[in-house]
Amino acid sequence: MRISVLIGSFIVPLLLRAQGPPALCVPLTTDSTSVGDHIDGVQLADLNNLGSGTLGGPGYVDLRYGSPDHITRLMPGSSYFLEVVAGDRADEVISAWIDMDQDLLFAEAERLGSYTSTGPGSSGTIAFTLPVGARAGYATLRVRMAYQVPLVDPCQTYTYGETEDYMVLIDDGSPCIPLIPFGNFSGESITGVTLNTFSYSNLVGDPSPYSDLRHLGAMLSIGIFYNLSLTSGAASSELLAAWIDWNGDGDWSDPGELLGQGYAGSAFQTLVFSFTVPADAEMGQRVLRVRSWDSGLPPSACADRNFGETKDFTVGLRHPAFLCFPVAGNTLGGDEIVSLELGGVQFAAPAAWPFHTVHDHVPLRFDRGVQRTLTVESGAHFPSRYQLWVDANYDGDFNDAGESLFTTISSASGQVLTLPFTLPAPMDPGQTHLRLRCSDGTAPAPLSCAASTTGEIEDVVIVVEDAAGPCIPYVAQWTQRGDHIDGVQLGAIGNVGTGAKRGRAYRDHRSLSTPIDAGTTYDLLLTAGSDSLHTFDAFIDLNADGDLDDLDEHLGRAFTTLPGEQATITFTVPGTALPGTTLLRVRTTDSDTLVGGCGDLAPGVGETEDYSVIISNSTGMASHTAGTFTVIPRPGEASVLLVAPDPWTGSTVLVFDGAGRSVHQGRVEGSRTVIPARMWSTGSYTLHIGGQGPQQVRTFFWP
Ligand SMILES: [Ca+2]
Ligand SMILES: [Ca+2]
Ligand SMILES: [Ca+2]
Ligand SMILES: [Ca+2]
C-alpha cells in the first residue's frame, strides 16, 4: 500500500509535466488588445483560423495542438503565403517566424517576413519559401502583431498587440511523417522500446508527436529471431505497431515490414512483437518506426491520426563475420567528417542518415607495413574524436589485435587533421575495410562495432598487398552475391569447400602446390559458389615475372549456370614455360568481361585464389603425357569419381585418410572409376595409383 502511494506521488508530477506542448518564450503586452490591437485571422496552406482574436482578448494565445485547423504540413523548398488579418486599429506591425531547427527559440534567420497593416480589418501577406534543408518534424509558427514598433521581436514585451502560436509539420516525405493535430499529450505515447541490446525509455514523453531518434537503435543479424518490446503511455487504452523498412526503399509498406501490432488496455503496458530478420535482407542500416494512436484503425506507418505519436530508430543489419553496421549517431551536433582524403582520392562524406557510408567504387591499394596518411576536415564542434581502424583479420569487425591504427581529437572547428597509419605487416594480403569514425570527443570512445549517439562512420574498401607478393585485384562488391570459388583441384591440389557468400575476396593458398610438366595437358577442376552464373578464369605466371598477362598465361575460361556446379579448364603447359615454382591464379565473377589476372572490377563481384605450381621441363617420362588424373568428390552420390586415361585401366588404386589409414583398395575400372565413400568422415585424403609408369598421388578433401 505504502509502495503504491510512493509510486503514485512520484509519477504524477512527471506526467503533468509531460502534458502540453513544450515551453517557448511568452511574449507579453502590458495593455494587449484593450484598444483593438488583436490578430483577427491567420491562414497558411491548410491552417485556417479566421476571426481568431477579439477586442480585449488575451495578448498571447497558444493554439498549438488544439484543432486540425491550427496545423498544416509544409514541404521544404516550397513557397507559401501567410495571410494575417489585423484587428480594429491601423499601423500594426506584423511579423511571423517558424522555429525551423525546433530548438524552441526564434532566431532572426527564422523570421518569415514583416509588414505594416494598412487599416482596421485589413489583411496582408507574408510570402516565404521554406528552406530546402529545413529540419523535418513539428515546428512552432509564431505570428505577432504590435502597434507602431519598428521591428517586432518574437519575445520582447510591448504595450499593445497580440501573439498567436500554431504548429506546422515540416515534411519532405522521406521518411513520411504522420500529421497528428492533437499531439501526444493525452498519453497515447510510447514510453519504452527495447530490442536486442538497445533500450530506450522516456516516461515524461516527447515534446512532439514525431521524434527522429535515428541516432539510437540496435544492430541485428540477418536471419536471426528477435523480440521487440514497446511500452505504452499514460493513456488507459492505446494501439501500438512497429515496422522495419527491410528493403530500404523509404516506406514501410512492403511484405513483412509490419513487425506487429497490438492493443494496450492499461497505462504503461508492454507489448512484445517477435520477428526474424529476412534471410534475403541486404546489409546496411534501416529505419525502425514505432507508432501509437488512439482508435481502432488498421496500422499504417504514414497515415494521419488525431492523437498519438511516431518515433524512428535505426537498425543496422549485418551478416556475422562480414562488415558490422552499428548505429553511427548523427552530425547535428557538429561531430562530423566534412571531407576525407585517402590515397589521393577525395571521398564524399554525406551529413545525412544513416551517417555511415561504405565507399566501394574507387580501387585503392596499399602495401602492408608501409606508412600512409589519411586527411580529415573536422566539423563545427570540437573536441571531436576521429578513430581509424583496419579489419586486419577479415572477420567484419575492427576489435582485433593491431586493428586500431590511429586516434586523434580535434581542437578547433573546421580543422584539417592528418592521420598517419601503417597497415600491420603481419596481416594477410587481401581486400578489407578501413573504418574512420567520428564521435564526440568528450564522450567515452565508442568501439568500432558499437553504437554511438553522435558523429558518423566512413568505411573505405581497400586492397592490402605485400610489396614482394603478387598483384591483388580490387573487386568492389566482393562475394556479396555469392560469386565465390568453392573448389580448386589440379594434380596434388585438392582445395574444396573454401569459399562463402560474403567471404573473403582474395585468398592466398600459395602454400598449396602441385608439380606440372611442360608439354603436358591438365584438367583444372573448379567448383562454383552459391550464385547461379559464374565465369572462371585461370592464369599461370609462365615466365615468372610477377604478372599474369604474358603470352599463354591466361589458361582459359569456364562457365557455370547453377550454384555449386563444377567446370573444367583444360590446358597444356607450353614447352617454353620457365621451370620452377610459380603462381597459379583462379578468378571468378558473374560477368563475362575478361579483365586479366590483375584487373579490377569496380563495380563487380567475385573472388580470387592463388596457388603454386612447380613447372618441370623434363619431358623424359613419356607416361606422364597421358597421365592426367582427376579426382572429383561427389557428396550427393556418396562417392568419389576417378577420371583416368585408358592405358591405366587395371592399375591399383589406394586411398588413405589424413591419419594414413587405408580406406579403399581397388583398381582403375576404365576412364571413370566410382569409389564408394559413404563411410568416410570429413577430412583430407590421398589417392595413390600404381602399375603404369611412376606412381601418381592426388590429395583431395571429402566431402
Ligand atoms: Ca529556432
Ligand atoms: Ca520498404
Ligand atoms: Ca577484425
Ligand atoms: Ca608473367
Image (cartoon, rainbow, N blue to C red):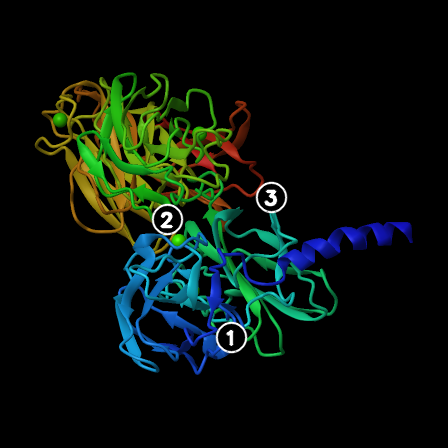
Nearer the camera: disc 1 or disc 3: 1
Categorize mark 3 by other alpha carbons within 10 Å: few (<14), some (14-19), many (20+).
Answer: few
x and y percentages locating residue 464 in the rendered image: 28, 27
- Quadrant of ligand 3 in image: top left
Q: Is residue 16 left or right of residue 653?
A: right
Three-letter code for the amino acid on which mark 1 is drawn: Gly
Residue sitting nearer the eye, 552 or 685: 552
Q: Residue at x 37, y 17 (%)?
A: 426
x and y percentages locating residue 677 in the rendered image: 52, 41
Three-letter code for the amino acid on which mark 3 is drawn: Thr
Screen quadrant of the N terminus? bottom right
Residue sitting nearer the eye, 88 or 446: 88
Three-letter code for the amino acid on which mark 2 is drawn: Gly
Q: Which residue is mark 2?
A: 482
Residue sitting nearer the eye, 298 or 382: 382
What mark, if any, has residue 630 been given in the picture? none
Nearer the camera: disc 3 or disc 2: 3
First along the sequence among labels 3 and 2? 3
Q: Is residue 495 above or below residue 299?
A: above
Q: Which residue is mark 3?
A: 197
Q: Which residue is mark 1?
A: 57
Q: In this orientation, does residue 586 appear?
A: yes
